[in-house]
Image (spheres, rainbow, N blue to C red):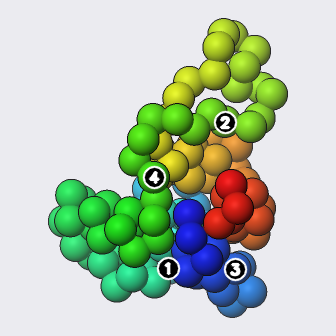
Amino acid sequence: MNQRGRDALVAAALAGQRQIVGTMSDGHGGLCAMGVLAAAARVLDAKTGHRFAVVATLYDLNDALIYECAEAACRRWGPPVKMSEADLVVHLNDHHRWDFLTIARKLGPEV
Ligand SMILES: [Zn+2]
């Protein structure tokens, strides 16, 4: 994730954006981390394929399946699952309930 993506997540946190899990937008103002990125890219309501393509390009989300979850709980039942960076954002938001700032801090440009 590039600095632009990180900035979007930090801005959402500072604005008190309500965070949800399991879906990008609940239609009542709640957004997951990917929803924040899509909203900042103005493609929240676009079709899924287009939305993910725009988000991945704008924020330099790597689609190589090389990312492992950092949470020890995910390694308890076997070797870590490899996923794309976008999948990891969704996983950390939904499965581990990482907040926007934690995702921004740990998936920043230097990772
Ligand atoms: Zn995990």
Which residue is denoted by mark 3 in the rendering? 10
Three-letter code, disc 4: Asn
Alpha carbon separation for disc pair 3 and 4:
20 Å
Residue 91 is left or right of residue 41, and the answer is: right
Alpha carbon separation for disc pair 1 and 3:
17 Å
Q: Earlier in the sequence, mark 2 or mark 3?
A: 3
Element marked by disc 1: loop
Q: Earlier in the sequence, mark 2 or mark 1?
A: 1
Three-letter code, disc 2: Cys
Tag nearer the camera, 3 or 4: 4
Question: Is the residue 109 above or below the residue 10 in the image?
Answer: above
Q: Quadrant of the C terminus?
A: bottom right
Q: Earlier in the sequence, mark 3 or mark 4?
A: 3
Q: Is mark 2 within 8 Å of ligand 1?
A: yes
Which residue is denoted by mark 1 in the rendering? 29
Which of the two residues, 75 or 67, is positioned nearer the viewer here? 67
Which of the two residues, 1 or 49, is positioned nearer the viewer here? 1
Image quarter for residue 106?
Answer: bottom right
Q: Using the rendered image of the protein, determine whether residue 94 is visible from the camera's viewpoint.
A: no
Question: Is the residue 16 above or below the residue 1 in the image?
Answer: below
Q: Is mark 1 within 8 Å of ligand 1?
A: no
